Amino acid sequence: MDLKDIKAIIDLMKKNSVSEFEMEKEGFKIRLKRGGGSIGPVAVEEPQMIAYGVPGGQPVAGLGTPPAPAKAPSNDMEITSPMIGTFYRSPSPESAPYVEVGTEVDAETVVCIIEAMKVMNEIKAEAKGVITEVLAENAKPVEFGQALFKIRPA
């Protein structure tokens, strides 16, 4: 979104007496709010675009401010959810988790279960390495593509 588009949104807000406008799309977020007096629309949040999938999430095209400094870059990979569902770390509430931080896994190691439509789906590591972090909370919903674990490749 460029300045021309933002100005067009502001004009539409004026013409239609809209006092607030908010949009979030692919890492870009803008929020406009019109004041009660003679003040025109004011950008409450600075527009920001971040490249996802790039280590460190580097800003794109100079829009917005860079994200807060992250931990030192690592070679850790993420095991992501292949579906929407409920994340479970163990096969049953009484059982120990499939994996813990420090567990060595290979491509066929089951790391968790995701329940979707009453079907329990075993999720495999799909890589050889060591689990370095558990990112999802047990018995909580997860989204498609959400990071579940971090793994340091072997």
Image (cartoon, rainbow, N blue to C red):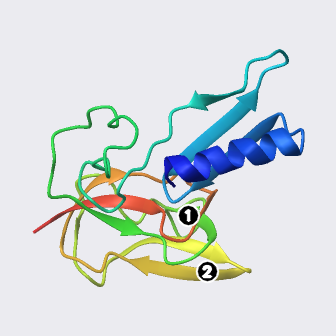
Q: Residues within 10 Å of mark 1 (few under 14, many from 20)?
A: many
Residue at x 22%, y 78% (from the top left corner)? 106
In the visual, does 39 lie left or right of 142?
right
Residue closest to the eye, 110 or 50: 50
In the visual, does 110 lie left or right of 6?
left
Q: Amino acid at mark 1?
A: Tyr
In the image, is residue 41 above or below residue 49? Answer: above
In the image, is residue 63 above or below residue 25? Answer: above
Residue at x 10%, y 69% (from the top left corner)? 154
Q: Where does residue 119 sit, x and y in percent of width and height? A: 67, 83
What numbered label is drawn on residue 120?
2
Residue closest to the eye, 74 or 99: 74
Residue closest to the eye, 71 or 45: 45
Residue at x 61%, y 30% (from the top left corner)? 43
In the visual, does 48 lie left or right of 22?
left
The image quarter in which residue 35 lies:
top right
Q: Where does residue 1 sit, x and y in percent of width and height? A: 51, 55
In the image, is residue 88 above or below residue 41? Answer: below
For numbered disc 2, what is the local secondary structure? strand
Q: Where does residue 58 sit, x and y in percent of width and height? A: 27, 48
Asked if labels 2 and 1 touch by Cβ distance under 8 angstroms, the answer is yes
The image quarter in which residue 85 lies:
bottom right
For numbered disc 1, what is the local secondary structure? strand
Residue at x 42%, y 49% (from the top left corner)? 49
In the visual, does 148 lie left or right of 3?
left
Label 1 or label 2, whichever comes before in sequence order:
1
Query: For the residues marked 1 and 2, what is the alpha-carbon distance in whole angstroms?
Result: 9 Å
In the image, is residue 104 above or below residue 134? Answer: below
Q: Where does residue 90 sit, x and y in percent of width and height? A: 50, 65
Q: Which residue is mark 1?
A: 88
Q: Amino acid at mark 2?
A: Met
